[in-house]
Image (cartoon, coloured by chain):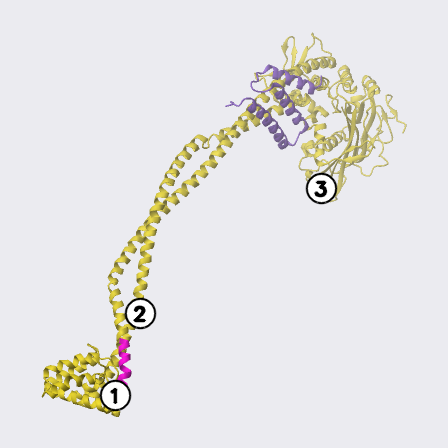
Chain colours: A yellow, B purple
Amino acid sequence: MIQFLQLELTNFAIYPKASFSFSTDPERPLTVIRGENESGKTTLMRAFLWVLFGADGIQEATGSAYALRPVWLPKGDPVETKVKLTFRQTKGDRTVTFNLVRRLVTTDGVTALNLERVLLSRQDSDGSFKPLSEAQIETLHGIIRPEMRDFYFLDADKAVDFVGGTETNHNDQVMRKMIGKSIRALLSLDDLRKAADRVDELRNVKLREIAQSNTGATGINLQGALTQVESVINKLKDEIPVAKEAHDVAAEVYRRADEQFTAMIETFEKASKRAGELKKFRDDRERLNIQRRQLMHQLAERGPGAELAAAMLTKSLKEIIDRLEPMKEKGHIPPSELEVIPRLVKRGRCLCGTAIAEGTPEAEELSRLLDKARKTETGSRFLDGVLSLATTHKRVGAAAVRSEPIMAIKTELARLDPLVGELSRAIEGIEKEVTAEGGQQSVATEVKRDVNEKLAVRDSRRDALQRLQTELEGHETSRRSLQEKIRAAAGHGAQVKALKATARAAELVCAVLREAYVHVERDQVAEVSACMSGLFGEMIGTTADGLISEVGLRAIGQQVYNPEYEIFARYQNADKPLRLINGASRRALAVAFFLALAEQTGIRVPLVSDSLLHSTSGEVRRRLVELLSTGQRAGQPIMFGTRADFQAPEIRSVLKRCAGVNYTLTAQSHVGRDVVRADPDRQQSNQVSVCRCAPEEFCAVCERVDDASAANLRRRVT
Amino acid sequence: MGNEARVRKEIIAAVGRLSIPDFNPQLVEKAAIDCVDIESAHSHAATNINQQVDQLLRQLGAQVVVNAPGLP
């Protein structure tokens, strides 16, 4: 149960400051708020709607603060409008009191309403009010649901909308829309229907996800691709070792050939270096030989050939003497003995110390001398000369031939001869080496060609191996990718399975909720319909023989779930079109519908009604007021009306019995017309004053012309 | 009977009337009632409601996957 306790307005439209406390007396639950036309009843209703529902509650003023801003303030003056509603909610034994405050500062009539500030606070056990968080403020709409707005606050215009509008502008679609909305809001089936629809939508989402997932590659396709890739990988893994071995062999062959070639090149380089040395040695020897020949020539010029020969054969002097002396003693030395000289020379040495070996320049020189001797002298004479000189030399020793110029030449020759000998031996050794290696040049060229061929083979095999390895890496990457996709597909399969299971669960839950919804709604609508018919009959006083024998609700169309409903009226066992039902019956029908809904659903909330009694009269009005005032069916009645609505004695009787609180609204702009005097507390002429007068009372604030003289009115003692 | 009790009663009756293979009827009942309770508790935070109801349906679906591994 929800009850409004107090409504406080500050700077709200035509209310500078006003406070209304509402009756919570179970014996006299009615709060009457009387006001003539243009005295602030509708504005007060708007204050309720704004504080509870914000801008949504005053849709006609959305985007404009005109409906809220104090009318007496000029444009540009900032002012805060504030409405505070205190209400309580009782659930079982527990009652909680709330303060709801909504504020908005305006400087003109177009201030955006979304700038408003809301504060909801809850009373604690110590009596203080503690503000709730923004999230908790949302719970306000769970307590006072926006869709029930038209049930809390009912004015004459809205009431007739429930039966299709006014008589002259009837529209069944309006009626069906309003009826369906109210039934579903007040039967508390909105949650059930929303739950069913939400579950159905989630099921559709799952089905869409399943459909989308089926468009991708399946695990089976991926597995086939993986098998193919693995087959290629295995083939490559077989080929690669063979290719690697072939490459290694080629590489080794090449390496060895290259090593051989490199060694050969080193040898060539070494030989080349030796060749350089050889040339130098040859050049040196040639130079020395030239010097030596020059010396020998000089020496030759200094004596006859025989002397030279003798001089050169110093160490063989004894043998020369021993050989030639006997021949000379026999008379002569035969020229045939000239050959003995070279043989002797072979064993001897030159005076300079140089070995006279066959083939040496010295020997050649000696041969030349001997040849000369044969040509220029007889051999006997030459040999005589040699014998004579040898004898002389032997006798006088080497000194005889060591005259100074000759000695100088000989000394020089003695220096040169060893050098020439050493060079000749070195040259001979190098020539042997170079001769041995020189034949390898052509071989090297062949080897180099072979090395290049082996390198080409090795590179070719290396390239083949690399191609295989690259191919293998590519396929292994493909395999990893496919394996990941297969794993994902496996996970995806599990996901799809879960989606299907969730979709199936949703299908079942939705079916259960809709089945339950159909049954609850059908049963409740039938109950509401029966109750409505009874209430209507009670208000209008119809009977089976009257103009309307039965009213109620019924579903239209073939739709079982969430059908449209309409109000029907029957006359003499036939439907009576609602457009033919007159004004008083239309309001009675609407009120019967509301009260039946409230009674059947057990809802107990404030029912703020404005001008509902218009166009009713007599017993119908009395019964209507009776039904609305007792609070037995709807909850806390708060009734707005004019004095004319309440002046009938039978109405006053009901109000006297049921009204716990009364208020009268007086527009100060009426002062000077039918309002007698201005409120002494008023600040502006276009404001509203509030007093506690009941409909049959008047006071200094609300007194109107003729009130004092009216027999059915009395002055309220303040 | 209040509406909440009536709704619960009709949900239980609906589970009885509907043939529900693979699923535990008590779990379906509980899921359906929880869906309505979630809806009642959140009149505005629609995203949050979707998440809660989705979670609830997944749990119920997971139960049937366990019980019926051959679910197509």
Q: Which residue is mark 2?
A: A273
Q: CA distance from mark 3 to mark 1?
A: 144 Å
Residue at x 80% of width, y 25% of height: A32
Q: Main secondary structure of the magenta part?
A: helix
Q: Secondary structure at mark 2?
A: helix
Question: Is residue A409 part of the magenta span, yes or no?
Answer: yes
Which is closer to the viewer, label 3 or label 2?
A: 2
Q: CA distance from mark 2 to mark 1?
A: 36 Å
* Residue A579 in view, yes or no: no
Residue A682 falls in image quadrant: top right
Q: Is residue A115 left or right of residue A384?
A: right
- The residue type indicated by label 2 comes to Lys
Q: Secondary structure at mark 3?
A: loop
Q: Secondary structure at mark 1?
A: helix
Q: Which residues are magenta?
A: A406-423
Q: Which residue is mark 1?
A: A409
- The residue type indicated by label 1 comes to Ile
Of A494 and A561, the residue lying toward us: A494
Q: Chain of mark 1?
A: A
Q: Which residue is mark 3?
A: A108
Q: Is residue A685 left or right of residue A382?
A: right
Of A369 and A444, the residue lying toward us: A369
Question: Is residue A227 part of the magenta span, yes or no?
Answer: no
Which is closer to the viewer, label 3 or label 1?
A: 1
Q: CA distance from mark 3 to mark 2?
A: 113 Å
Of A90 and A257, the residue lying toward us: A257
Furthest-right residue in this view:
A717
Q: Position of residue A90 (x, y in %)?
A: 77, 25
- The residue type indicated by label 3 comes to Asp
> Who comes first in sequence, dot 3 or dot 2?
3
